[in-house]
Amino acid sequence: MIRVPMAVQSSVPQKPIIGAMRVLSVLALGSVLASLAASAGAFAAGAGDPGAAPRIVAGEPVCVSVDRPAVPHVEPFLAAHPADPDLLFGAAVLLPDAGRGRGGIEQTAVAGFRSLDGGRAWARVAFPRCLVDPWVSFGRGRDVYLSCLARGGAVAVFRSPDGGRIWHRPVRVPTAGGGAADHPILAVDRSEGPRGGTVYAIFAQVLPAAAPGRKPRFGTAVAASRDGGRSFSAPAFLRDEGLNQQPFDATVLADGTLVLLLMDYASFQRPLARRQAWAARSVDGGRSFSLAALPFEPPGGLAPVPLAADPAAAHRGRLYLAVPGLAPREAGGGLAVLRSDDGGASWRQPASAAAGVPGPLAAGARTPAIAVSAAGVVGLAWYDTRRDPRGECFDVDFSASVDGGRTFLAAVRVTPEMSCPPAGQDRAVASRWPFGGDYSGLAATADGHFRVFWSGSRAGGVSQVWAAGVEVVAAQ
C-alpha cells in the first residue's frame, strides 16, 4: 500500500477571499433574474443589489509541488470530493531527468497531491508504476481512483478507500490482445441506480483487424469495474471502420448514463475530408453505445475538448463542452461553450449575443477545463496568451456562467504573472508541452467554489503545479 506523508506547507501565502459577500452557490435561496447582460449578467440575492453583476474573486496561487522545485511538472488534473469541500486530490507528470537530456516517456513519473484544507497545503503521493496521462475521480463514500499509462502501454488504476491517504496496489485494465493503450481516462457512476459505483476506464488502443486483409486501427475502448475498481471487464470497442479515434473526456449523468467524447484524427483505410468529433452514450453500463456527431471540426493536434455535466435541478443532466477555436469569427475564433440537453445527441451552438463577451470567447485560449458546481454555476478556466505579443507566454484566466451556459461573466486573471517558456533544463519540456500539458485541472468543490489546477513557471523557473481558489460572488 502507498501511504501519504504529512502535508507539505506551501511557501506562498494564501490570499484571503473577500468575506463581505454572498457566495453564488447558495443563491438558490434568493431569486435569480431571468435576463442577464451579455457581457456579465445580473442577479438578485437576498439583500443584494438586483442590478449588481456577480463578480469573480480569485485567491492567491499556491505552489502545489513546492517540495520538488527543480523538477518540471506538467499535465495536471484535479478532482474534488462531492461532499467534503476540503478534500481535493490532484495529479501531474514530473520529469526528474529533464535536465540531463533524458526527457522521453520512460523517464517520466506521476505524482499525486492530496489536500485536506481546500487547497492551502498539499501532500505528495508517488505512483511508481505510472509514467504519463494521470486522471483522477472520486467515487462513492471516500473512494478515490487514479488511472495512468504504465510501462508497456498498460492502463493502471489505483484505488484508495479513505480519500487518498492509503492506496492499494494497481489493477491492470485488460486490453485487446494485450496491445498498448493511450490516454486513459476515468468516469465513476455515483448515482443510486442499478449501476451505481461502476468505474469506467476509457482509453485508446490498437484494435484487432475487423476482417481478413484489413489493417488494425487505433480506436476507443471502454472497460468497466463493478466491484469498486478491484477488477475490470474485457473492453468494449466503439467501432467506426477505417478510422483512428482518440477519447477526450467522459462523465456519468445522474441517471447512470455514460457519455464520452472521441475524435477521428487519422485514417488507415481512407482519407478524411474533415476530422469529426463524436459523443457516445451508453445506458447499459458501457456494453453498447449510440453515437452522435458533434457540430464542429476538432481543433488542431490533440487539443483537449473537456466535458462537464450539470447536477443542479434547473438544468440537471445538461452537458457543457469547451471547444477552442470555435467561437464566431468576429469574436476572434477563440474558446466557445456548447450545450446539450439530450445526453449529447444534439448540441446548441454558442448564443449570438455572447460573441462580444470578453474572455471565454476571445482568441488565445489554450488547454481549457470546465466544471459545474452543485448550484449549476459553470466554471471555465484556460491558458491565455493574449497578453504576450509573441503568443508564447500565458496566464490562467477564469470565467463563469450563472444562466446555464448562455452567457459568461467577464474573465479574471488567476495568475499574478505570466508563465513563459524557461531556459535550461525545462526548455525541452516546454517545447513538448508549451501550455502545461494536453489538459489542465478545474474542480467544483462541495461549497460551490472552484479550484484551478495548472502547470506554469515563474521568473524563468521550471514548470510547477499551482492551485488557486475562485469564487463567484454577489456584492451586498
Image: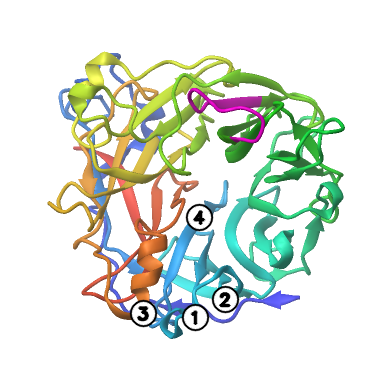
Query: Please, what is the three-letter code of the amino acid marked with disc 2?
Result: Gln
Query: Which residue reaches farthest left?
Result: 389
Q: Which residue is mark 3?
A: 425
Secondary structure type for disc 3: helix
| Residue 409: percent from left, percent from top | 24, 32
Q: Which residue is mark 4?
A: 78
> Which residue position is annotated with label 1?
96
Residue range of the region highlighted in magenta in the rendering: 267-280
Q: Quadrant of residue 351?
A: top left
Q: Nearer the viewer, residue 289 or 229?
A: 289
Q: Is residue 33 above or below residue 332?
A: above
Residue beneath the point at 60% across and 40% down: 246
Evaluate if marks 1 and 2 touch, with contact meaning CB atoms under 8 Å apart: yes
Q: Quadrant of residue 338?
A: top left
Residue at (78% x, 43% y) in the render:
223
- The residues tagged by marks 3 and 4 sit, at their Cα atoms, a distance apart of 26 Å
Amino acid type assigned to the residue bearing label 3 in the image: Gln
- Graded by Cα atoms within 10 Å as few (under 14), some (14 to 19) or many (20 or more), the crowding at tag 1 reads some
The local crowd at label 2, few if under 14, some if 14 to 19, many if 20 or more residues have their Cα within 10 Å, is: some
Q: Which residue is denoted by mark 2 in the rendering?
A: 107
Viewer-nearest of discs 4 and 2:
2
